[in-house]
Image (cartoon, rainbow, N blue to C red):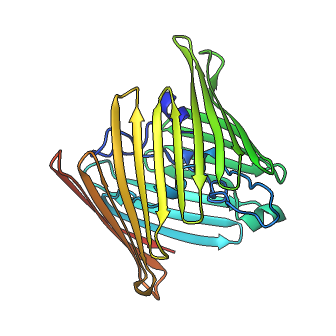
Amino acid sequence: MGSVLALSSNPGHQNWPFSKNHLPSRWDAHPAHWDRPPRWERRDGRLPNPGSFHSLHRSCKDVFPHQIEGVKMIINKTLSSFFKVSHTLHLSAVSPSYYRFHVEHLQSDDYSKDKDAPALIGEMDSSGSLNAHALLHLTERVRARTVFQTQQSQFVTWQFETEYRGSDFTAAVTVANPDILRESVILVAHFLQSVSSGLVLGGELVYHRGRAEEGGILTLAGQYSRPNWVATLNAGKGGAHASYYHRANKQIQVGVEFEASTRTQETTASFGYQMDLPEANMVFRGMINSRCIIGGVLEKRLTPLPATLIMGAFVNHRGDKLQVGLGVNVG
């Protein structure tokens, strides 16, 4: 849904000062099992399902550290087998501080319980902004999602998505921000096909119509995966996005990304890595990119307490900026 975000409004809570891009919108995130990377091999010899279009670059992106700044505390609480809540308090000197309340209600049918799929997700922050998701498994192969997002008192996003997963292909259609009075709408179609046990080909078609403009963007996508590495490429009129993920061993994972945009006339190359230290209950993620930004985030599990300590720092050598963050995740 990156193309939809580029064409629609994206208010966001924060603007990361090290980059001109906004942080990823929270409503663009999918449940983990929706974006699970496809298995490259099946015992029955048939081609595997390629997974969701949103997950093509996920293996590489998960290696990079999430940008952190200020002080953040997250408290998670499971009230029942179907009901979860979390409280987030973020204090920052760069962006406005906020409090966010997040709640999830899980589906009660047997299929969804096995997948641990949230049926209803909602969150509201101290500024009055609301994000609401409804995730439904209509059948074993058909999934539907509805998203509403408000920025204070104004609706900024309303989105409807349907996805069908065949035995060796995935097709999805999304309608975003339809407005009859303004005669505007964004339509997105995704299709992925498994060509072999490791090769996936497909594309994305984005159509945008408004009173003042109308146009479409076609993006072709391909992914080749092996047990220890995944190479992915998206290319179209709007630019190109290439990524490479490699698992060196059980402790070390690395990823390389290259992004080029024809709209902003900018290119960015990034290198990230993740190091797992299970004996020390620690995970470290680091990155460096062509904009002279270096950053790292350390996560330390505070056993036997149900809490994780998060420490991060990012340095922009070109802009001579430094940001440090500290967080605690409880539950």
**120 sits left or right of 131 in the view:** right
Q: Is residue 109 visible?
A: no
- What residue appears at the point 37 percent right and 59 percent down from the top-left corner? 272
Q: Is residue 137 left or right of residue 292?
A: right
Q: In the rendering, at what x and y percent does residue 280 appear?
A: 40, 85
- The residue shown at (48%, 38%) is 151
Residue 276 vs 191, above or below: the answer is below
In the picture, residue 318 is in which quadrant? top left
Q: Is residue 173 visible in the rendered structure shown here?
A: yes
- Closest to the observer: 7 or 197? 197
Q: Residue furthest top?
A: 212
Q: Position of residue 81 (x, y in %)?
A: 71, 71
Pick whichever, 326 or 83, lies toward us: 326
Image quarter for residue 188? Answer: top right
Side of 201 relative to 17 (left or right)? right
Quadrant including the N terminus: top right
Asked if 51 appears above or below 109 in the picture, the reply is above
Residue at (58, 64) in percent of width and height: 85
User: Front-most of 105 and 116?
Assistant: 116
Number of marks in the image?
0
Judging depth in this view, the residue of 305 and 96 nearest the camera is 305
Q: Position of residue 135 (x, y in %)?
A: 71, 50
Residue at horizontal 70 percent and vertical 65 percent from the top: 116
- Give percent across and percent down for residue 270: 35, 50
